[in-house]
Image (spheres, grey):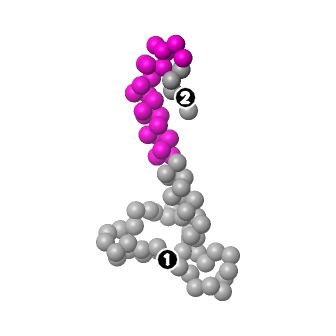
Amino acid sequence: MKEMELKYGCNPNQKPSKVFMENGELPIEVLNGKPGYINLLDAFNGWQLVRELKIATDFLQQHHSNTYRLPAPQWADL
């Protein structure tokens, strides 16, 4: 089991929490510093946004030729 202790956040008197996986390694790597819970939420939400944008742009690129053949635009460009 791999685990990572998290920064305490705004209240230094509180016991720090941790992130762990029962099987395998954590799917994240911290390059600098010690993240807190909010930092992890920001990172995961940012990753999800980038992933969704990539899926959307890949879909638009596959259907890009249809955009100019139709009299009215059917797809939005990002």
Q: What is the x, y in percent for residue 7?
A: 58, 75
Residue at horizontal 51 percent and vertical 26 percent from the top: 75
Residue 33, can we see it? no
Which residue is at a point 47% across and 34% down the rendered structure image? 57
Circle number at residue 31 = none
**Mark 2 vs mark 1, CA separation in Å:** 41 Å
Quadrant including the C terminus: top right
Q: Which residues are magenta?
A: 50-72
Residue tagged 1: 18
Give whichever of discs 2 and 1 has the lower sequence position: 1
Q: Is residue 6 visible?
A: yes
* Amino acid under disc 2: Asp
The answer to which quarter of the image holds residue 58 is top left
Can you tell which mark lies on residue 77? 2
| Residue 63 place in picture, x, y as percent | 41, 25
SS for callout 1: strand
Q: Position of residue 22 (x, y in %)?
A: 34, 75
Q: Residue furthest left?
A: 23
User: Residue 32: where, in percent of width, then height?
Assistant: 55, 64
